[in-house]
Image (cartoon, rainbow, N blue to C red):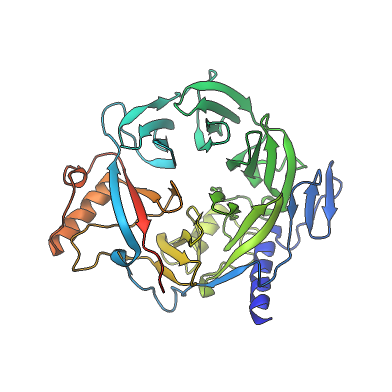
Amino acid sequence: MGNQHKILNYFCLVCILYVCGACTNNTHNRGIKFAENGEVLNDSLTYMSMLDDDSVTLIKLPDLNNSGSRLIYTDELIDSIWYVPLETNKQSIFGGIEHLKVHNNKVYIVDNASNSVLLFGLDGKFIKKIGRTGNAPGEYINPVNITVNAFNNRFLIYDDKRRKLLIHDLDGNFLQEKPIGFRMNDFVPLSDSAYLVNIHLSENRHIPEIAESLLLTVDTNWQIQSAGMPGSVNICSDFSHARDGIYTSASGHLYNPTFSNTIYQYQGDTIVPKYVFDAGSMNLPPDFLCGLSFDEYIEKYDNPEAPYGFIDKPIIETDTWLITSFRFRLMNVYLFYSKDGGRYHWSIMHQMDPESKRFATLTPIRGMTDEDTFYGYIDGVSLYNEIQRAQENQELLLGDELTQLEPDDNPVLIFYRLKPDNG
């Protein structure tokens, strides 16, 4: 009962965070029905608040405000690692990665500096830019998210400025576009005819049917089929901090609301809590968003002195690992949690074994190509400088892909296989 009580407490924190106490449901909204354990639109997407010890894993993290963190030695964690520099030439050079998808033998990238979408091979060779800026069919103004629908072999670009979805084949050839009547953060395919969508609350308050929902399901014409997961940040605050929240895992789809330390499972049109992180004094206050301006948020909660931490990067789950990172004092805190034994690697800092000659660095994991292989990326100048620092302390065996690296090169993909957790 003690552990269950803790889980319930943290679940209540998340509920208060998004419902914000005084916010009320609009029961007069057309098409919305209410169930005892959640909200249902068209009787299809249900938010379940039932918690028990068998269904929820409580993970207690070391409190960085009080105890610091253990240094991660990469040789203890990483079994094998390899680097793929993305080709740098006049056509392919870009400023920074906003979104990255690796699918089969292709790498899809949204460049946040030029608002462009680029296609590379898995070997790092530049293939082409997909689409271009403009108002014509197949063109975009502000591409903010991408995904691959493996059910029908389509590559999708979401243009936030024009509220439309651009559909391509996997080679980046434009096929058609679909208008979208709302703003969203990210989306994942559920089948060849349906998507799960994480919406942008503060920009959809004018649509009563979805004004207080965080998740939608839609069909291929982007007609809303269901809405659920209550959220009223648009009433409690003048801003909402938009970011990706839906991740495909070995067990299906996971969802993590912004600023929440709870990870939910989407299963059978039901949303249920699966993991809850206890971060001690790093936990955000339950009502911190209500009445808060963006400047006040930065001043109190997201700066080098703020004592708060929250999930900030993609969540990757396999049968054996739960991987993510937290944002704490404007830094990344790496988390590799072993589901088998409940052990974890948790730290802001990482370091190679002093006796090792294999260069191995860490970067937030962005996805996985299969159950055993994960990937992330690092910008060229950061990787170059890290190699130079490491070589000052020990002799390194570097492959050609790293010895030829220049500081102004495109980012470098990093692929990892982790060691099994043998306790």
Q: Is residue 111 visible?
A: no
Where's residue 353, x and y in %?
A: 24, 67
Q: Is residue 301 visible?
A: yes
Left or right: residue 379 compared with residue 178: left
Nearer the observer, 89 or 275: 275
Nearer the observer, 142 or 295: 142
Residue appearing at x 54%, y 47% in the figure: 244
Where's residue 154, x and y in %?
A: 53, 30
Where's residue 10, x and y in %?
A: 64, 70
Residue appearing at x 77%, y 46% in the figure: 44
From the image, which quarter does the C terminus lie in?
Answer: bottom left
Residue appearing at x 83%, y 60% in the figure: 36
In the rendered view, tell whether residue 371 sits above or below residue 99: below
Left or right: residue 267 compared with residue 297: right
Left or right: residue 34 compared with residue 171: right
In the rendered view, tell whether residue 52 sits above or below residue 87: below
From the image, which quarter does the N terminus lie in?
Answer: bottom right
Furthest residue in direction bottom, as rendered: 2
In the rendered view, tell whether residue 22 sits above or below residue 403: below
